[in-house]
Image: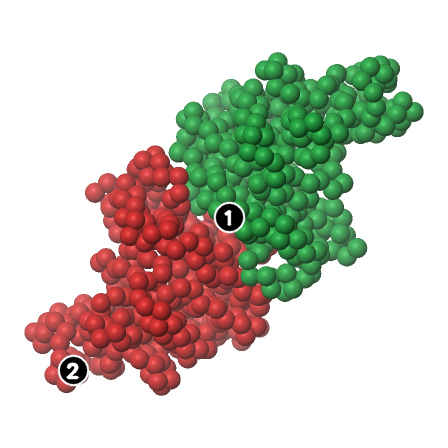
Chain colours: A green, B red
Amino acid sequence: MQAQAASRLGCQVRTLEKTADCPAASVVHDHKVGDWNDPDTLIEWAKGCDLITLENEFVEAESLAKLEESGFPVIPTSATMAAVQDKWIQKQRLKEQGLPVPVFESVSSQECIKKFGEKLGWPLVLKKRKQGYDGKGNATIRNPESIQEAWSAMGSGKYPLYVEAFCPFVKELAVMVVRSVSGDHTEYPVVETVQKDHICHVVTAPCSIDAAQQKKASALARSAIEAVQALGCFGVEMFLTREGEILINELAPRVHNSGHYTIEACPCSQFENHIRSILGWPLGDTSLVKPAAVMINLLGVGEGPPLPQGINEALQNADVHLHIYGKSDSRKGRKMGHLTLIGDHMEETTQQAISLASQLVFGNA
Amino acid sequence: MQAQAASRLGCQVRTLEKTADCPAASVVHDHKVGDWNDPDTLIEWAKGCDLITLENEFVEAESLAKLEESGFPVIPTSATMAAVQDKWIQKQRLKEQGLPVPVFESVSSQECIKKFGEKLGWPLVLKKRKQGYDGKGNATIRNPESIQEAWSAMGSGKYPLYVEAFCPFVKELAVMVVRSVSGDHTEYPVVETVQKDHICHVVTAPCSIDAAQQKKASALARSAIEAVQALGCFGVEMFLTREGEILINELAPRVHNSGHYTIEACPCSQFENHIRSILGWPLGDTSLVKPAAVMINLLGVGEGPPLPQGINEALQNADVHLHIYGKSDSRKGRKMGHLTLIGDHMEETTQQAISLASQLVFGNA
């Protein structure tokens, strides 16, 4: 989706991925296969590129710094990526700026976790400082007896870890913020995300919170990405607590699943605004074109082809926007596509979107 | 744009073009360079494809028939393309179905042209039966004395020609019609096209004609594509005369410049509906999301790079949708991109769009 937005603006896109048959390979000018953390591979790949940007957070900041040292502009910068990739450093940065985050602490042993729990109560969340996504790299610890299990699940100390107070939220919020190399910035509406098995399942825009809370969430999101000197489009995930407090959960240094709805629901999508922001072009309109937008991820239910069953049924609704990612095959839990529905009433639009998504089945259960 | 819509629906796209650096090459899974009229090249290229479709009308029907004989499904079919490519046959088909077309006649000499003019009056338009587009392949004959010049310009009888009464229109109309392999069909709104130097310059949707005329134009367009047993998305160009009569000018057997506005102005674009129609999937909503949509083609004013000057100025309008085609370079008169603006009032939207387009300059005059 990022590459398509760039192509529409006249850019030629070259990608680097670990596999030849990734979805991006089918829609770009030039696709290379290689290890994105090997500086030599990166530099060879980058030759001839005017600008380098990221679509995931897994290319190590050290490798990106090597690109910068070789004269290739990278946006967001390696310094920003270093601050975001290590979630403990990320949280430290946010905390240093006075931004609200759950209580957290770096831990190096089961004993540290136990002490943290005794001080703050249970449950806790044990997290890898790096490389986690979609719930991978997190383990919830409900009581002292389950420390051992979580510790093993997170590699028994093999990776740097931190522990965090479990935040009993009433809603999970997200905001996409765009910050341009020109100094401009803009924010998309505050959305609500509903996770299922730690994977973003439904996104509703706008979130049903009052205007003051929306304003607060939006301002927090903007401050959060300023705290890491972000450039480009960043996602900011937040918790809304029972008490109406908003805490920052984490940053995504890239376009984000919670912003896919913007393709149809906003005049300018997160993908186009990311490209505009890194080129220093004026940013596009981020408002909603209809009062309600709902995005639902379509996950594989099992192995099978990359096209879903039920297309003929689902597309009977002439307004549904279906995106099929063209992955090599379906697997249980794999993100195979998404759908977006925009409408005039949130409840009706959500019910319709859920019903449509249930008709589209990737793979065999 | 066609390839991007197909990719979004999970298709892998393979293209065949005469050059390696055409815009499509940068956004498809696999691009081959070759002569699309050589049956061996076509068949070799088609191996592994599930379905073949067209994005221009220049692949000869005979070559497409060879593909079909080799077992490859082609939509629209070679039979339809044979009826559309030869504009004299196209007009015959429309006339046979009782559809209104300007008076026309096949001609093989200057004498025939003179007789036609004496019978019907001047001016006339001399046209090549095949391969014309954007005014290439047409010559207006204002009086008997200019027959010689037009005859030479059209190849002095080297190509099959026909002559047509000049239609003194007050507006040029166009409708995109989608006809699915499933039997479904849908039409986009009737638009007005304004040509400049025989190239589509501005498209306004909807056209400012009354509801009865809109209905008539839409019905004529549908009948016209049925007359050639079209499948897929077809453009129908029409003339509205001073007397309120609507005549069919010609068919475009593919997505069409007069339908580019549908990307942002309709829930489902002409590109997506073309793909849906050839796959037999239900068709998407073709209504306008706002009361006014204006598309303006951006032509090169001279030689230069494929990115325009004036991007920073034009994108100050946060609502403009800019498409840059990524052609190798700018040349005078070359279609380098387009912009679309949607709004609540046609006059205001048109004025804004014209002003924005004037800021975007490809190449040096």
Q: Residue furthest left?
A: B145
**Residue A279 shows up from this direction:** yes
> What residue appears at the point 58 percent right and 42 percent down from the top-left corner?
A205
What is the x, y in percent for residue B257? 36, 59
- Residue in front for this viewpoint, A230 or A331: A230
Q: Quadrant of residue A96?
A: top right
> What residue appears at the point 73 percent right and 18 percent down from the top-left corner?
A104
- Residue in front for this viewpoint, B258 or A45: B258
Residue type indicated by callout 2: Leu
Which of the chains bears the disc numbered 2?
Answer: B
Q: Helix or strand or loop: what does disc 1 sit on?
A: loop
What is the x, y in percent for residue B326? 40, 45
> What residue appears at the point 27 percent right and 44 percent down from the top-left corner?
B355
Q: Is residue B186 left or right of residue B330?
A: right
Residue labelled with disc 1:
A290
Q: Is residue B209 left or right of residue A287?
A: left
Residue labelled with disc 2:
B120
Q: Quadrant of residue A109?
A: top right
- Residue in front for this viewpoint, B127 or B247: B247
